[in-house]
Amino acid sequence: MNLLTQVLHLVGSGATAYITAANMRDPKSRPNLLAGFQLAESGSVPFLEALSQRAANEGDDWLAEKLAKHAQDERRHGQIFAHALKQLNKQVIDFKSLPQETRDGKPDERRRSPFFEAYYEGYDVKEIFSPDRMDWLVFMGSTYILELDACKDFVRMANALPDDPVSQNLKKGMMSIAKDEEGHASYLQEAIERRLGYFGAEALITEWRTRKVNAMVAMVTNLLKKGGQMPSLAMDGVPSEVAEGMLDPDGTGEVTGKVTAEPIAA
């Protein structure tokens, strides 16, 4: 990274860390954050499972096994966040019931992500997120950066939680998630190096780090315009199937991956 990118990385990461920690600590904003994480973690499961099957079909049993484990981890993560919402008597909103546009004709903010729009700038997101067509290096590079940063962000947010029993239970769950994310980043880095070698991997990682910095700036700018408030992703009530986790709510893939929701994500 060049000096400007490094500075922006520090500034963007710091601003995002402050906002997400504050939202996790505040009982009023916590449900929205948890709902975003549930959508992101659970929503990635079918995509990762499909990629695992594709890797197996291509004869890469090592990658297929790693992706299958990744999918299992994400399913468990979604269940952790769903349980945390349940304890708050909340659940994720039904995306199928949301309008495509607001009354003034603008796209509903809960259906778009300024972060991912910037992160994948130049790509047709709906096209590249088809598991049978997505470029492996795009998946590996972009996901590696998100997983690497997520493990640190989850620890930071977990430590921001208050000391009550319910919050401490969530803290334990988030710490275990952070450990999983670290493992995901490790296998993805190895997968990149298997294809490109060390120096090629470093170049790819630098490219996606730069994209992440630009995307963070877009996300933070959007959040600051809203006073740090995130779109409403949670509603009152607890569905009977909440413990089973959620998949992509509308089948479009628009809420898959991290951050979910924004990365931490988002």
Image (cartoon, grey):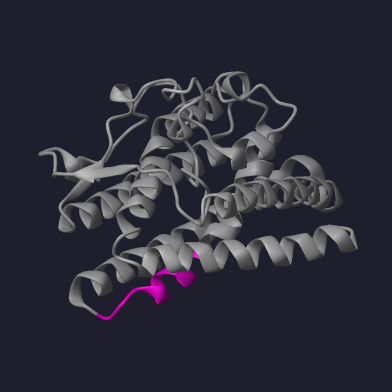
Visible residue check, residue 83: yes
Residue located at (66% from left, 32% from top): 136
Give, as a single range, the part of the protein colored magenta.
Answer: 152-163
Outermost residue on the left side: it is 240
Visible residue check, residue 152: no
Outermost residue on the bottom side: it is 163
5 relative to 262, above or below = below
Residue located at (43% from left, 39% from top): 68
User: In the image, is residue 154 part of the stretch drawn in magenta?
Assistant: yes
102 relative to 197, above or below = above
165 horizontally vs 17: left or right? left
> Where is residue 3 drawn, in percent x and y?
89, 63
User: In the image, is residue 50 part of the stretch drawn in magenta?
Assistant: no
> Where is residue 97 drawn, in percent x and y?
28, 23
Indicate the quadrant containing the N terminus: top left, top right, bottom left or bottom right: bottom right
Residue located at (35% from left, 67% from top): 26
Outermost residue on the right side: it is 2
Residue located at (45% from left, 45% from top): 70
**Front-most of residues 30 and 168:** 30
> Where is residue 199 drawn, in percent x and y?
86, 52
Outermost residue on the front side: it is 104
**Front-most of residues 256 and 70:** 256
> Where is residue 27 drawn, in percent x and y?
29, 65
- Classified by dominant secondary structure, the portion drawn in magenta counts as helix
Can you tell which quarter of the image residue 191 is in? Answer: top right
